[in-house]
Amino acid sequence: MKMRYLLAALVLVSVVVVLSSCGKKEEPKTETPVPPVAKAAPTPSAPTEVPKGSGQTIGVSLLTKTHVFYQDMEVAMQEEAAKLGYKLNVMSAEFDANTQNSQVDNFIVQKVAAIILCPADSASVGGAVKKANAAGIPVFTADISAKEGDIVCHIASDNKRGGELAAELIAKAVNGKGKVLVIDHPAVESVQARTAGFDEVMKKYPDIKVIKQPAEGQRAKAREVTENMLSANPDLKGIFGINDDSALGALAACRAHKGAAKIVIIGFDGTPEARKEIAAGGQLLADVVQHPKDIATTTIDTIARYLAKQEVPKAIPVPVDVLDKAAIAKEEGK
């Protein structure tokens, strides 16, 4: 019996040892595990590719369709919108603030994705902007800004710099003395910026007397204003037209007025007709050149980015240049 108990005990001990040995896992080495190498995050940068739309409509109210500047803008807007997958509903205020306000009302009823305004009146357009704000439609201004309401982004020429360049050109042309007429359009913010730059530079020329007369940016009115000023100021030495229609209207008046052939004229825009006059070396001495197609394309691209939930700046200035006879000859390789 004792022998039987002893054998049983030995068997039990052997089983325990075997089971203990089978259940025991090998201890891991004490080396610290190396984590996987993380990929470096891409450096944030401004998006280069403009996001595409999906057929949304953008309402556009231009100041006018009679000026080459706005005709060029419309063409470039249509081209860029088509490329990005947007439709445009382009209207024209033809210098009338009430017409423009009605156009904005129509855009709101149509529930457009965004609105582009080239205000006929920078102050009074604020009511229309606020209506669009209340309807949840983002508003962008191109070329001319609005003084009231929430504007997502304003895209325009660097108009203050343009006015400064025009002042330097005309001051040099009149040898720093004499009377200079500015054919103005004070209801429009972009022109206010131009004349502000012009006035700032003129502080350096105390012997130049500046006279301002409004003509609403229209050629016929600019000619009439110039004719009246030539009669009242036979000693006029220079004219700054705040756009090319103003400058060309002034040029027509000078050509029809005896004794006005030596008056120098500076324009603003760089339209084909103005370029031709400048290249001929006549009274239209030079232009401050805007780039309406760049303004238009940038405006559409900015809207596309905004609708794609990307951040956009509050203002985008587009550079201006000086165009004179020498610059045209250089461009044409002469």
Image (spheres, rainbow, N blue to C red):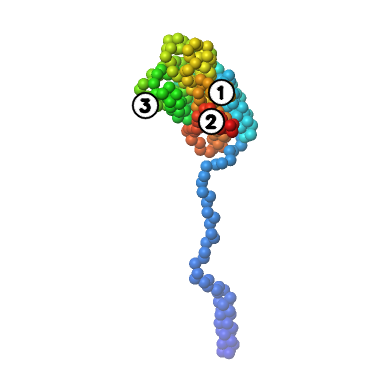
Earlier-in-chain disc, 3 versus 1: 3
Q: Position of residue 88 (x, y in %)?
A: 61, 27
CA distance for labels 1 and 2: 13 Å
Which residue is labeled 3 in the image? 204
Earlier-in-chain disc, 3 versus 2: 3
Q: Position of residue 80 (x, y in %)?
A: 61, 32
| Element on which disc 2 rests | helix
Density class for disc 3 (Cα within 10 Å; few <14, some 14-19, many ≥20) is few
In depth, the one of 15 and 125 nearer the eye is 125
Q: Position of residue 84 (x, y in %)?
A: 62, 34
Identify which residue is drawn at 47% across, 12% down. 259
CA distance for labels 3 and 1: 31 Å
Identify which residue is drawn at 37% across, 26% down. 204
Task: Using the rendered view, name the quadrant where residue 20 is placed.
Answer: bottom right
CA distance for labels 3 and 2: 26 Å
Q: Nearer the viewer, mark 3 or mark 1?
A: 1
In depth, the one of 41 and 135 nearer the eye is 41
Residue type, label 2 = Ala
Res. 295 visible in picture: no
Residue type, label 3 = Lys
Which residue is labeled 2 in the image? 327
Task: Using the rendered view, name the quadrant where residue 94 is placed.
Answer: top right
Q: Quadrant of the N terminus?
A: bottom right
Q: Nearer the viewer, mark 3 or mark 2?
A: 2
| Element on which disc 3 rests | loop
Q: Quadrant of the C terminus?
A: top right
Which residue is labeled 1 in the image? 280
In depth, the one of 255 and 300 nearer the eye is 255
Identify which residue is drawn at 51% across, 38% down. 311
Contact? badges 3 and 1 (CB < 8 Å): no
